[in-house]
Image (cartoon, grey):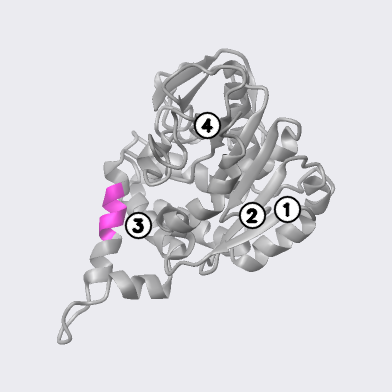
Amino acid sequence: MRYNKLVVDRPFQFEAGGFLDHLELVYHTSDRDYRPGDTVVWICHALTGNSNPEDWWPQLVGKGKLFDPDRYFIVCSSMLCSPYGETGPASVDPKTGRPYLFDFPRTTVRDIVNANILVRRHLGIRHIDLMLGPSIGGFQALEWVIMEPEVVRDVVFLATATRVPPFMTAFNESQRMALEADPTFREAKDLKGGSAGLACARSIALISYRTYAGYNLTQAEPEEDTLFADRAGSYQRYQGLKLLRREFDAYSYWYLTYALDSMNVGRGRGGVEAALARIQANCMMISIDSDVLFPPSHGRATVAALKTAAYREISSAFGHDGFLIENDQLTAILKPMLEKYQNR
């Protein structure tokens, strides 16, 4: 897929207050320009993902895959506050010549969607045929079909919710506490600040993404006479270091956890049900049976509020991360949605 950058030199207002005069918005598309009449598939990425879904969803996105960029015009825009080129706390403030860090405006899911809408308009896309997103990507999709109800035709909400659950906020706060426990984080001298805290925060998050059964399947000790179990512990440390090697920084992570905590489609709209009533798109909610962050009970309740939405459930031993693992089940659900566009 093709890397792109949109530079916006006009004021961008943030929902929680503050504005920026300059934005850089990074996105990937199919390896060609958009043509009116193309079937548009817009993918909203998850928390530590990036704008190239071939990187983080390679089983589903790519040539010859379910989401084939040669067959469909695929777009994925990086989130505000992501460290992969999008404007965020890791970006250089043109007024100071240094990264914004804690001077960046507090960012909400609605801010992220408003930035994505700038990309849509820049590309000249008037209608999105299929939008989907997992986790915070699903937060974006939910907000988007409320904010622009006439734009999206079909939408899939995957392992997500209409409001941030208290259980997730508890995990988010625990991760922020881990960042705060690293004294280099508040010193904010450069983007390496808080690196040890970030590795710990990632370890905390991973537990919420997985399950008891999943850890038993993959991290059980290989020998019966092990004196001190360490395989799962080594895995946790590896996952923390892996995020650091991906050049994620603690400040971007800090802001993104607060973006998660901003999710409430009912805010300022008369409540969740009133907000959902604005949606015109054909909706599908997909839950994962072992997901502790967004359990199926919430998915079914959302479908009941939407009244005309479809509901699907996939089975996984790996909890929330099942959306990255259970590719055959997802393909079986999503393929019929794409088939109606293939003969256009």
Front in this rendered view, residue 339 or 250 = 339
Instruction: Give me the disc on residue 285.
Output: 2
Q: Nearer the viewer, mark 2 or mark 3?
A: 2
Cα separation, mark 2 vs mark 1, equals 7 Å
Q: Residue at x 57, y 41 (%)?
A: 339
Q: Residue furthest top?
A: 9
Q: Is the residue 233 above or below the residue 136 in the image?
A: below
Q: Secondary structure at mark 4?
A: loop
Q: Earlier in the sequence, mark 4 or mark 3?
A: 4
* Mark found first going from the N terminus, 4 or 1: 4
Q: Which residue is mark 3?
A: 200
Marks 4 and 3, how far apart at CA: 23 Å
Q: Which is more foreground, mark 4 or mark 1?
A: 1
Residue placed under numbered mark 1 in the picture: 309
Give the magenta range.
237-242
Please give the name of the residue rendered at 49% of the width and 45% of the height, measured from the top-left corner. Answer: 46
Q: Are marks 2 and 1 in contact (CB under 8 Å)?
A: yes
The residue identified by callout 4 is: 104
- Magenta highlight on residue 38: no
**Horizontal relation, residue 178 to residue 146: left or right:** left
In the figure, 328 relative to 188: above or below? below
Residue at 43% from the left image edge and 26% from the top image edge: 91
Q: Earlier in the sequence, mark 3 or mark 1?
A: 3
- Asked if residue 249 shows in the view, the reply is no
Residue 332 in sight in this render: yes
Whether 238 is among the magenta residues is yes
Is 104 left, or right, of 184 in this rendering?
right
Measure the C-alpha gap from mark 2 to mark 3: 32 Å
Horizontal side of 156 relative to 86 (left or right) equals: right
Question: Foreground residue, 339 or 110?
Answer: 339
Q: Secondary structure at mark 1?
A: loop
